[in-house]
Amino acid sequence: MTTQRTLLENGSIIDGLGNPPVKGSVLFDASGILQVGMIDETTLADTTLQRIDATGKSIMPGMIDAHCHITFDEPHSNDELFFHRRPGLAAIIAGYNARKVLQAGVTGFLDADCIFDLGVDLRDAIEANVIEGPRMSTGGYVMLTGVGGTAGRLLPDTGTRGYGVVVGSRDEIVAEVRRQIKYGVDWIKVHVTGIIPRQAEAGEIQVWSLEELRLVVDTAHQLGIPVVGHCRNATSTRDAARAGFDLILHATYMNDESLDALVKHGTPIVPSLTFQANLADHGELVNAAPELRAIFRREIEESAVMLRRAWDAGVPLLCGSESGFALTPYGEWHYRELQLFVEEFGLSPLEAIRCGTSEAARALKMYGKTGAVKTGMQADLLVIDGDPLADIRILGDKRRLAHIFVGGRAVSREPPRPRAAIGGWRVGQFAERALTWDMAHGHD
């Protein structure tokens, strides 16, 4: 029987495991990576072989984005996200955007919370080859207390809105975890911190008790499903680790106590600082307020030292871009978290690539199965025109993506058709600021 195989020849192989690059070739098919390094040509008999010359290029695992909101469609505000979306159209557009993510070199991603519980259906459509997209793991609605998450009073006291479901009693918590698992989620997500209006100066504070967090974990783990938490202060990170969370998003503003909890429990972190960095560095291009830019720059600077200490202590760091907002549009910034790991945390490019590939495979629940150029792994691969170890930023230049493979299959490079405006989908603004008499008469 003839087998279709692909041979990437004579490239610089970056294995995604942190080992120094080696010159060699990679042989693979739909079943996975068959050989790496020097290829035994005698094994190529009776095969249909596609040879690709990778001389002068880098062969590496596809990037895995451990924090990507594929169903949000780049809102400019929570108001737009919560009140200007429709379930059917949101699902169709999410499929359109998944292809953009794939064509940026992302061969897998985690969408931990999604609007209208759409993630399960999108994942299943990708796996069934109904639409083209990266490997996907997904949550459903993020679980919130009545205090809310980062959207404050836009969230209801009960029920669902946007990407969230509000739960109160122990019975409601257990019922919601079980409901999501019944419908097929890969992860349960909890918004452990939120903003309280009269305490806004404190930033996000913990809005779940340790007992409640343990209840979520115990219920989910009983049914074989891991739990991920949004944590943006010290106590939330500490208590999520103590409760047995399997993954923590952000973990910013940590202290020694929260770091100790992470180290003790080995809880992986997805810092997801790309959103903050984009606003801090490029906010003037989108008319962001200078004070907001300063707040986000401070969050990066004040968190970088502790996140680096976590890495040095053996805590896994995963790359996640939080793509899905106007500041992090699909297909544009997935690489940037790797860049921040180098520039802000002081990791080497080799270490950052490990965080964005083999370590990030934890978010897919495929750790040890993909994210590495190694015999037996899934053939999720990139061929890069250039050397990302010399400049990690080239991973953001789609013109340098010579080839992309998922599951041994070549990805179409035909870009999606440009979208036209959709009525009611975006927030319509009368103006960016109020038109006063002084302004109109040149006194402002």
Image (cartoon, grey):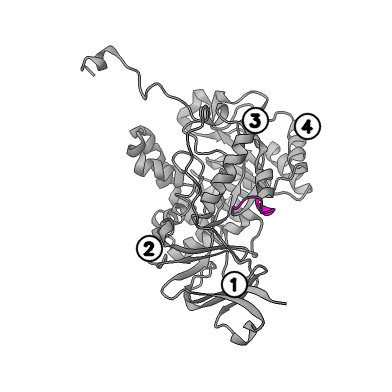
Please tell me which of labels 3 and 1 falls first in the chain.
3
Mark 3, Cα crowd under 10 Å, few <14 / some 14-19 / many 20+, is many
Q: Quadrant of residue 185?
A: top right
Disc tally is 4
Question: Does dot 1 land on a helix, a strand or a loop?
Answer: loop
Q: Hey, which residue is sitting farthest top in the picture?
A: 437
- Type of the residue with mark 3: Thr
Spatial separation of the CA atoms under disc 2 and disc 3: 43 Å
C-alpha distance separating marks 3 and 4: 13 Å
Q: Check whether the beta carbons of the residues at disc 2 and disc 1 lie within 8 A of each other.
A: no
- Which residue is tagged 1? 374
Indicate which disc, 4 or 2, sits on the residue closer to the N terminus. 4
Q: Secondary structure at mark 4?
A: helix
Q: What residue is shown at x 40% (from left), y 37% (from top)?
A: 295
Please tell me which residue lies in front, 6 or 284: 6
Q: Which is nearer the eye, 94 or 296?
A: 94
Residue at mark 3? 145
Residue occupying image coordinates x 52% and y 30%: 425
Give the distance between the C-alpha atoms of the residues marked 3 and 1, in whole angstroms.
44 Å
Of callouts 2 and 3, the N-terminal one: 3
Q: Amino acid at mark 4?
A: Asp
Mark positioned earlier in the residue sequence (3 or 4): 3
User: What residue span does the magenta drawing correspond to?
Assistant: 126-133
Question: Could you say where residue 153 lies in the image, as x and y percent from the top left?
Answer: 56, 23
Find disc 4 in the rendering and name its residue: 171
Task: Estimate how packed mark 2 is, as few (under 14), some (14 to 19) or many (20 or more) residues with alpha carbons within 10 Å.
Answer: few
The answer to whether 145 is drawn above or below residue 322 in the figure is above
Residue 391, labelled with which disc? 2
| Kind of residue sitting beneath label 1 | Lys
**Residue 346 in picture, x, y percent from top left:** 41, 59
**Magenta part mainly helix, strand or loop?**
loop
Q: Report crowding for label 4: few under 14, some 14 to 19, many 20 or more residues within 10 A (C-alpha).
A: few
